[in-house]
Amino acid sequence: MSRGHHPKDPIQTRAELLPEEQAAGSDDPEMQARAILAESEARTENPERTRDESIQTPDEV
């Protein structure tokens, strides 16, 4: 990282809507970003629970 460069706040970064989110609209992009990031963090911190609860995560063989 270069000196003087500060990364953007993750919430502000995620609050920048993706094209499909812009098309659908969002009443509160920052609140939406907080929810998305909180869910992502929970999945990262507890991958076994994610595997058990997700229909998108394949079962281990």
Image (spheres, rainbow, N blue to C red):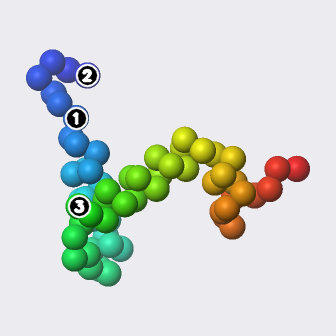
Residue type indicated by callout 3: Glu
Determine the residue positioned at 22% across, 70% down: 28
Q: CA distance from mark 1 to mark 2?
A: 9 Å
Which comes before the other along the chain, label 3 or label 2? 2
Left or right of 11 on screen, residue 42: right
Secondary structure at numbered mark 2: loop
- Which quadrant holds residue 16? bottom left
Disc 3 and disc 2 in contact, CB within 8 angstroms = no
Q: Nearer the viewer, mark 3 or mark 2?
A: 3
- Which quadrant holds residue 56? bottom right
Determine the residue positioned at 47% across, 52% down: 40
Residue type indicated by callout 2: Met
Crowding at mark 1 (Cα within 10 Å: few <14, some 14-19, many 20+):
few
Q: x and y percent of residue 26 in the render? A: 26, 75
Q: x and y percent of residue 29 in the render? A: 24, 66
On screen, residue 9 above or below 38: above
Determine the residue positioned at 28% across, 45% down: 10
Q: Which residue is mark 2?
A: 1
Which comes before the other along the chain, label 1 or label 3? 1
